[in-house]
Image (tube, grey):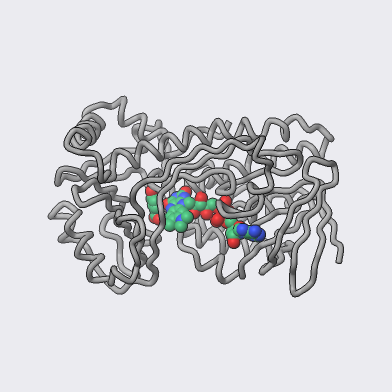
Amino acid sequence: MGMQTQVAIIGGGPSGLLMSQILQLNGIDNVILERQTRDYVLGRVRAGIIEQGTIDLLRSADVADRMNRDGLVHEGIDIAFAGERQRVDLHKYSGGKTVMVYGQTEITEDLYEARDKMVGKILHEVSDVELHEVTSQNPYVTFKHENQEKRLDCQFIAGCDGFHGVSRATFPCSILKTYERVYPFAWLGLLSETPPISDELIYVNHKNGFALCSMRSETRSRYYLQVPVGTDVNDWPDERFWEELKVRLPDQTANELITGPSIENAVAPLRSFVAEPLSHGRLFLVGDAGHIVPPTGAKGLNLAASDVYYLSRALLEFFQSGDETALKGYSNRALQRIWKAVRFSWWMTLMLHKFPDDGEFGEKIQQTELEYLFSSEAALSVLAENYVGLPLD
Ligand code: RFL
Ligand code: PHB
């Protein structure tokens, strides 16, 4: 069975949904092909912090009502090390900028609702997606849906299918170069219906390993612990998680922790990864399909949003004027911003985690890095301007 559209979007995570929303708002027909069910996509608990650029993009895409109402504006973060908590005044050191706590789960729900209202075309539970003739003017996608073989003809393909998707795998090895670092630890996350320990996030450097106190709202908390690669969540019943979190927090802060039953736990590995280039003919990689950052800098979702921003603008330019210049420049343009976030996320990861093979010299350097950070306005400015998000242009 044949279908036709202007832009085929592979993957209905935040990148694919936001791309679809922006394109349709601008009169560009598109179809999303998503491997999972909608409930599965909505069940994933991921990012929590969004930058001003992401907020602006969600507002311009008409999906910001709930975010405007429920999002929590944060003007700073705390970093705890050597048993003390110190604040980074993001607002002061970034020249007046802030970030917002608003979850990826909520953003995805808002995007689905907006897509429903505009009768956006999303096919769920598709399988065997294959991309064809992507270097021609008329690429097409074949896939299985509801037990039928289907074909989608299009002018462009947006590969929004995450790290394990098919889009990047379609690039010939000869043109794709990848850069990767896998870290020797993972994050164990816990979501609970409990008030957050503090008004702001606390990033913790401790000899047992990193910890993070985050939140989703004034009544819902999100905590993470650094754990060894291969850790089984079942080895971490709630009591063990809370106990270890308390150990890693400064004493006074630990006393303020309100615990409760978890509503979600998962282990996520930490990786830095970049694919170059992000385009091949009329196929473009967007979000996690093209790059991965460790979550320490809170950049993954924000990078997905900036990719969507650059690619959607380039597609609009093409459909309005026939000019392909911006599309040809997409990869370089997006990569410039991506590499800066990759560097920042790597640096935050290095500064805050326990590296098993670091030795005493490594530990001294790490403590000195943190002491230097809080002794230098220049160093605080470097952290703040990156954390709130580098400019989109
Ligand atoms: P996603 O969210 O992986 O969505 C890709 C979609 O593509 C579908 N798919 C396919 N569809 C059709 N055919 C195929 N062959 C397909 N293969 C895959 C998948 O089912 C899926 O629905 O990528 P996207 O849209 O680019 O979004 C990226 C973000 O999800 C990601 O960058 C962030 O979640 C990263 N991340 C964080 N980012 C932040 O900015 N701040 C954070 O605090 C933060 N915390 C996190 C995170 C990621 C985590 N995990 C597990 C990866 C915490 C965790 C635990
Ligand atoms: C989260 O709330 O899930 C979160 C916040 C900040 C990070 C990573 C994750 O750096």
Report the front residue among 274 and 19.
Answer: 274
Q: In the image, what residue occupies the spot 15% across and 43% down? A: 82
Q: Is residue 393 above or below residue 120?
A: above
Q: Residue at the spot x=62%, y=63% of the render?
A: 112
Q: The C terminus is located in which quarter?
A: top right
- Most extreme residue toward the front, as rendered? 174
On the rendered structure, is 237 left or right of 115? left
Image vertical order of residue 292 relative to residue 322, above or below: below
Q: How many marks?
A: 0
Q: Quadrant of the N terminus?
A: bottom right
Would you identify the image quadrant in which residue 357 lies? top left
Q: Is residue 385 left or right of residue 195?
A: right
Q: Is residue 212 above or below residue 321?
A: below
Q: Could you tell me which residue is drawn at 59 percent across and 48 percent down?
A: 289
**Residue placed at 63% from the left, 37% from the top?**
176
Report the side of 367 relative to 281 (left or right).
Answer: left
Q: Is residue 48 visible?
A: no
Residue 390: give x, y in percent of width and height: 48, 34
- Residue 326's place in the image compared with 139, above or below, is above
Asked if residue 101 lies left or right of residue 144, the reply is left
Q: In this rendering, does residue 183 appear at all?
A: yes
Whole-percent x, y for residue 7 in the image: 77, 50
Q: Position of residue 302 (x, y in %)?
A: 51, 45
